[in-house]
Amino acid sequence: MSDEVPQTGVPDIHHSTFESLRLGQSSQSIAVGLIRFWDSLNFKKDTEFLGIMVIFLDEKVNSVIHGLISAGHHYRLSLKAGSIVKVVRFEVARCSSMYKIIDHQFLIRFIPPTIINEVITSAPEINLQS
């Protein structure tokens, strides 16, 4: 059984599951639930804005990963808690234990070519209820 989920309506495009993510920058694509997001601040430097932290839910129940949108990237208007989103062209990095907020070993880092869009039609079924 493949770890990729076909995207309905778009031939030859597949979404990776969290288990199949590969380290580094790539054209990987995920279709996930955006559970929550918040500002990340450095309280040691007069609450300097570092970026936005996000929590994503995979289509497999109880599989979550966090993401980081660094300061200077303008994705805030694309973020809506409780929505299903498609994220394309991002970096997968190992999560430092110092910044680990969930159990997953990786984090998704938004980079300049990253695209995030809310999925309106043909969305994979993702249960956002606990």
Image (cartoon, rainbow, N blue to C red):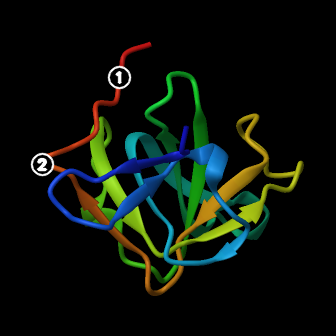
Residue at point 39% right, 59% down? 14
In the rendered view, tell whether residue 117 sits above or below residue 99: below
In the rendered view, tell whether residue 6 sits above or below residue 124: below
Q: Residues within 10 Å of mark 2 (few under 14, many from 20)?
A: few
Indicate the position of residue 15 as horizontal and vertical percent values.
42, 55
Q: Residue 40 occupies which quadrant of the picture?
A: bottom right
Q: Is residue 111 left or right of residue 87?
A: right
In the rendered view, tell whether residue 61 sits above or below residue 29: above
Where disc 2 sits, the SS reads loop
Residue that sits furthest to the right in the current view: 97
Residue at point 79% right, 51% down? 99
In the rendered view, tell whether residue 73 sits above or below residue 101: below
Q: Residue 26 occupies which quadrant of the picture?
A: bottom right
Labels 1 and 2 touching (C-beta < 8 A): no
- Residue 38: image tag: none
Tell which of 8 and 40 is nearer to you. Answer: 8
Where disc 1 sits, the SS reads loop
Amino acid found under the numbered disc labelled 1: Asn
Residue that sits furthest to the front in the current view: 1
Distance between the alpha carbons at the discs numbered 1 and 2: 15 Å
Q: Residues within 10 Å of mark 1 (few under 14, many from 20)?
A: some
The residue that label 2 is drawn on is 120
Indicate the position of residue 72 as horizontal and vertical percent values.
48, 83
Residue at point 60% right, 60% down? 108
Q: Earlier in the sequence, mark 1 or mark 2?
A: 2
Q: Is residue 98 left or right of residue 42?
A: right
Amino acid found under the numbered disc labelled 2: Ile
Indicate the position of residue 74 as horizontal and vertical percent values.
37, 77
The residue that label 1 is drawn on is 127
